[in-house]
Image (cartoon, coloured by chain):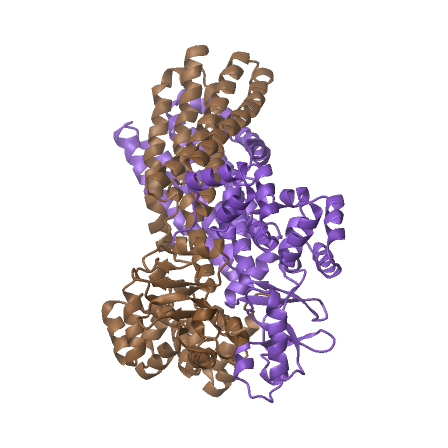
Chain colours: A brown, B purple
Amino acid sequence: MQSFEIDKTDLQRIKAALERDDAELETILQEYHASEIAIIFEKLPHEAKEKIISILPAQFASEVISEMDEEHHPEEILISLDPEKRSEIVEELDYDVATDIISQLDEEDQQEILEDLNEEDATHIRTLLTYDEDTAGGLMNTDVIKVNVCLNKKNALDEVIRQSEEMEEFYTIYAIDDEGTLQGIVSVKSIIKARADAKIKDLLVNEFVYVEAHVDQEEVARLISQYNLTSIPVVDADMKLLGRITVDDIIDVMEEENTEDILKISGVSEDEELAGSWQDAVKSRLPWLIVNLGTAFLAASVIRSFDDTAKKLPIVAAYIVIIASMGGNAATQALAVTVRRISLSDLSDRQAYVTVLKEFLVGMINGATNGVIVFAVAYFYDANPMLGLVMFLAMTGNLIIAGLTGATIPLILKRVGIDPAVASSIIITTFTDCIGFLLPLWLASKLLL
Amino acid sequence: MQSFEIDKTDLQRIKAALERDDAELETILQEYHASEIAIIFEKLPHEAKEKIISILPAQFASEVISEMDEEHHPEEILISLDPEKRSEIVEELDYDVATDIISQLDEEDQQEILEDLNEEDATHIRTLLTYDEDTAGGLMNTDVIKVNVCLNKKNALDEVIRQSEEMEEFYTIYAIDDEGTLQGIVSVKSIIKARADAKIKDLLVNEFVYVEAHVDQEEVARLISQYNLTSIPVVDADMKLLGRITVDDIIDVMEEENTEDILKISGVSEDEELAGSWQDAVKSRLPWLIVNLGTAFLAASVIRSFDDTAKKLPIVAAYIVIIASMGGNAATQALAVTVRRISLSDLSDRQAYVTVLKEFLVGMINGATNGVIVFAVAYFYDANPMLGLVMFLAMTGNLIIAGLTGATIPLILKRVGIDPAVASSIIITTFTDCIGFLLPLWLASKLLL
């Protein structure tokens, strides 16, 4: 199978049916998977989406809503639906999904939706709304299969089947005591295979990985990835079971975090939606560019302060842009490797030290190699060996500083608790620009004038 | 819980026990999860790892080996073990993991390991070794639970329990006919809940997502993410079931692909291991820097060809480095957003067109805004309104070109089948460097001289 791509025929058929009657539209829509309709939605105006959601059966409609990307605003469809239909759909949604969508609305709209829901669902969602979106609590689903440790095989199995009625998939069953404290986990397989008189407490795995609700989602992703889990229970400070996070939620978190890393390292605000409007893009990128403009004036002032050298030796200008450009790129390389390494695992002090030392060596060797080439050009093309020597020294020096900066700045930011990816290439390349101008101009003023 | 970090006490205890007796060492090691020992391994010399693996029970040893990162070379431990112990360990490994590890060895060592294995395991691994590492076939595990569609409830359940004996977790059960052709999938829940006389064929879900063995791992990741799957069956061209890929394997693929994206976009070869040696880093980065050196000479030649302007108006030099630096950064922003967007979903022609148009607008507005600031500096600080006008036009022009380049180049590369992330910032910023020099110098030569 191929991942789904919309072709024109799909769109035309659906658009034509939207104009005609609802029965035909419903028949056509049934041919698609809910996630495919969510993709088709990206091409349709708001009214069309609203109409499709209203005529689909609640169960199917809720799957479509679940599959919509946050940046295509499922909450806008929800709020414009007829209240009765809306409640039906929300009640079919997983609690964590419903909460994520409802949380995008303002207070008043949230209340309107919650008031129409049945009491149980409304309570679950109200609780989930209290957790920060980026924490384990914000990510978890409160709908878990839990059995009391005292149940025997038959009762436990009945209980599992009863509770799983509304779940598509169950990964793990959580065993709790009378107070709701998590005692351990138990697999369906071990219950099926157990002797008839076995109790849940005999089948428990007591050593298991869990998180508290306030833990950051990146940490949750790291745990799930490290221990190869399919789900992880979420507890409060007293080990009361609150919910669980499944691996498919974590896949979305990983995509989100990776997008943020790439954007931040490139000087784009992490909030920019990839498919957002040009207005949003300006808002997210202009501040960084203005910061860069300030630092670029700083770099340019280096050139101004060596006005004399530049006037006497205009050829130096052509060389310094090469030195500065190479420094910027070498720093970006060191930065990317270091930021990615930090985001996959924390580095110990010793590892951090080894990383910086490595970048020093790499900078020296890459700098000297490129320095020799620049020397050769100055020697053979410009017939100026002394200029060549200056540029060799400047290139080597600048690439060492680039390597050290690219590795050290994210490591320091991490130590002081700032996201290392904000050490974006904008900041670091501007730094190497300054050094890239200063070093050759200063050397030239000393050795060539 | 927190993700595991080694502290000095852990390491010291283990190192001390390594010197003393094996019984004590084994007791200490039992306190850790296999994935934790894999992390501790990163700090130990080869002999210590070999010793620990030899004294651990085969089952536990195989888990540790599974958890080791590829870049810490589990195959080196395996090949240096006593052959009997090695076979025990390899037989405990999942086939896909065993294959990945063995594939890192040379032909001769591979044969040595495979010859000592039992026939069944050796055959499974030999088959998997024929698939390319980055495809569905290279990723799948051949060890799946399959039941014949004609079985009734009781026999099917017995069969599932029998086959699941060696698996930790089973997600989905695959229903096949007598020829081994995949007919559908069935959940444990539906078997448990079925009437006693139900047959598997009555419980089947016939519509399901599958992949053929040659499909690229990125496509597999996209399917699993799009359809929220916990596993996906892998088939050959005749729909014969070959194996399955589980979501936890995909998490590793996603991390790998994301690392590659960040590295490539920053001009680092995708093969560079994050924790690799400085020699590897030089090998991976130097070629890109030399490419950049060539293009930087090109940019510098622009400055040389306007030698006259530079001599008469040395102040221009200080301004052009600002224009060039801003262009590089704006291009990096547009590039990051576009590359990330392409890697999350393919863009239709229309979406590509909208993206380019958006970057044009963003470039124009960000360019004009920064251009006004530069104009103000030229006007008030350098008292040269005409210079300000030149720099305003150059800034606006360069940022438009930067946006267009950053968006267009990855889109074109994608269309012609080249990985868009190789449109690294190195190439694109050098391009904007050239324009960043050319535009203000040319405008200055026309308007200021």
Q: Is B400 displayed left or right of B348 in the figure?
A: left
Looking at the image, is B241 positioned above or below residue A325?
A: below
Tell me which corner region of the image, top left, top right, bottom left or bottom right, holds residue B197.
bottom right
Viewer-closest of B423 and B301: B423
Looking at the image, is A352 positioned above or below residue B308?
A: below
Q: At which x and y percent is residue B417?
A: 62, 53
- Residue A48 visible? The answer is yes
Q: At which x and y percent is residue B221?
A: 55, 60
Q: At which x and y percent is residue A437?
A: 42, 24
Q: Please tell me which residue is depicted at 33% across the width and 60% down the height of the picture.
A: A213
Q: Is B272 displayed left or right of A354 in the figure?
A: right
Name the residue at the left extreme. Answer: A108
- Residue B133 visible? The answer is no
Q: Please tell me which residue is depicted at 37% across the width and 34% down the height of the picture.
A: B390
Q: Please tell me which residue is depicted at 59% across the width and 55% down the height of the picture.
A: B59
Viewer-closest of A299 and B309: A299
Q: Please tell me which residue is depicted at 50% across the width and 23% down the height of the picture.
A: A396
Q: Is A436 displayed left or right of B95 in the figure?
A: left
Looking at the image, is B381 positioned above or below residue B350?
A: above
Looking at the image, is A31 positioned above or below residue B369?
A: below
